[in-house]
Image: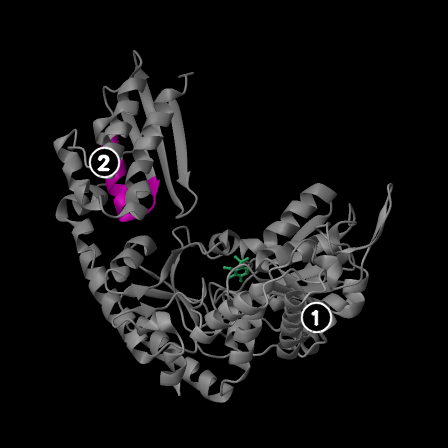
Amino acid sequence: MNEELYGEAIKDLAAREPVVLDGADASATLDNPLCGDRVTLDVRMEGGRVAAIGHRVKGCLLCKAAATLAAGTAPGLGAEGAARLLDQVSNMLKTGAEPALPALAAFIPVRPHKSRHACVLLPFKALAKVLAAPIP
Amino acid sequence: MSQTIREAFPALARPGFHYLDSAAMAQIPGLVSEAVTHHNRTARSNVRRGLHEMAQRADAAYDGARAAVGRFLGAPAEEVVFTAGCTLALNMAAWGLGRNLGPGDEVVVSRLEHHSACLPWMALAKERGFALRWLGVTPDGRLDLDSLGTVVTPRCKAVAVTHASNVTGAVSDLPRLAEAAHGVGAKLVVDGAQMVPHGRVDPRALGADLYAFAGHKAYGPTGIGVLWGRAEILDGMAPLVVGGGMVGTVEDGDFTWGEPPHRFEAGTPPVAQAVGLAAALNWMADLDWPAVRQQEAALAWHLLDGLRSMDGVRVIGPLGLEARVPVVSFTVAGCHPHDLSHLLAGRGVAVRGGAHCARPLMSALGLEEGTLRASLAPYSDRSDVDALLAGLAEAVKVLR
Ligand SMILES: Cc1ncc(COP(=O)(O)O)c(C=O)c1O
């Protein structure tokens, strides 16, 4: 029944309250127009790296869980690190690469479900996007 | 009865497969697929161009298909335009009626529309500078006809509405809409994509001026749609697409249009698909419709009843069977439609989750995450609905 997608680890991540960040230096919103998922990330930067992050998600459980994880992993990352993280998550889903962080293992069951990869990747794409843009 | 209908659909023979996504694309009877294959074997030639034997067979098949669609709609064949799909037909309608509108004119579209029905008018309004006025919806997902008097003004040149909603299943009161439109000299453009799969339609009797539908939702092939128009409307309408087969005369500096329906069929038309659509509509016309309607209504009731008794479920649309097709949308508190539809897919239950190309409706009803939609057809049976209800109860347990 595809229950394997909804293990405790993913459900725990999805259930966590999103962090609200006031006074962000930059924000990025990304949509998945096909399914309607929307992720918004707000970041405060210090020396080109994330000092604090907030996130808002309108989307499925997988997208919410991935957003919690992306936000949790973001502090300390710069543009390059965020791009690498996106590659790592993408490779883990698409080519079976080992999870780069232990917490990412929660998403291994999503591998065979190609139509859901976009749900997991959206928050990581948003993170790469917000850090790739020049910080005003 | 329903057993024989179901048996006509090879894709439904798989045990444990419950197809409740007919509003997105209906399944196709074996005899329709065979009609397309037979055409390609025996009459594959371009139409209205050749004199050889195959060409003559192709002409006869294509003309015959047009006549069959005409019979289904209670209309002369000349009022039937074949298109590549419903979306193209709706774009042709909008550009055909609206390309000369401008500031000071108004067009009414409803919040119940599929993007394919409202976006052509939105694009045209931007380009031509006329005003778009939105006809709202009631909380139970019907057109808000009480506001017709204020929304349709003497400046209105066209009213574009759906015959049946692809989200709520609500069936529009076309005669009342026609009266409002015609009362101010406006044309009524109707999207029949979700109505035609549930029985014969007579757009002229209902007051429509233009009426569009898709083949693949009406048990026919993909790549084919229909734009029906009153002869006098088509006569005065400009084509959206120009090219081979639609012209009168062509000279260096200018050309004239041919007569409808060919004026609207530039290029090689979807001949085999038209033949398939005709086979599908003929198949439909032969069904025992009182029995089919009763069966669809009983199943829709069973579904609505089952949903109502589930914790946290909200039906989006009419709760009764009056003026509705068996397309049922709902939300489940705390569960996203995509997670639910994926879990249901794992149990062989095919439904759709999302915004259903109907953002204006989602915004009007405050449905940010969209809905889950189960859509029935004459081949649906009780086991389909039971599998959905049982699967839903389990899916909710997995997610909560
Ligand atoms: C009400 C309605 N109108 C128009 C369309 C567009 O049809 P097509 O995609 O076949 O062009 C659809 C398809 O989902 C629909 O449900």
Residue at 70% from the left image edge and 42% from the top image edge? B127
Name the residue: 49% across, 54% down.
B357
In which quarter of the view is residue B246 placed? bottom right
- Say if residue A23 shows up in the picture: no
Element type at marker 2?
Answer: loop
Q: Which residues are magenta?
A: A57-70
Question: Does the magenta-highlighted stretch encompass residue B50?
Answer: no
- Give the chain of mark 2: A
Q: Please state if B187 lies on the left or on the right of B369 as rendered.
A: right
The numbered dot on residue A33 is none
The residue identified by callout 1 is B178
The answer to whether residue A96 is seen in the rendering is yes
Residue A130 vertical placement versus B206 (above, below): above
In the displayed structure, A101 sits above or below B178; it is above
What residue sits 37% from the left and 21% below the top? A132
Question: Where does the image place residue B79, in percent across and percent down from the top left?
Answer: 72, 70
Image height check: is B161 above or below B124?
below
Percent position (x, y) of residue A122?
33, 37
Chain containing the residue with disc 1 = B
Name the residue tied to disc 2.
Answer: A95
Report the amino acid beneath label 1.
Answer: Ala
| Amino acid type, callout 2 | Thr
Indicate left or right for A3 with B305 as reference.
Answer: left
Q: Nearer the viewer, mark 1 or mark 2?
A: 2
Q: State left or right for residue A12 relative to residue A33.
A: left
Relative to B10, say whether B292 is above or below: below
Task: Confirm whether circles 1 and 2 share one chain.
Answer: no
Task: Compare residues B55 and A75 and report the one nearer the observer.
Answer: B55
Magenta span has A63?
Answer: yes
Callout 2: CB less than 8 Å from ligand 1: no
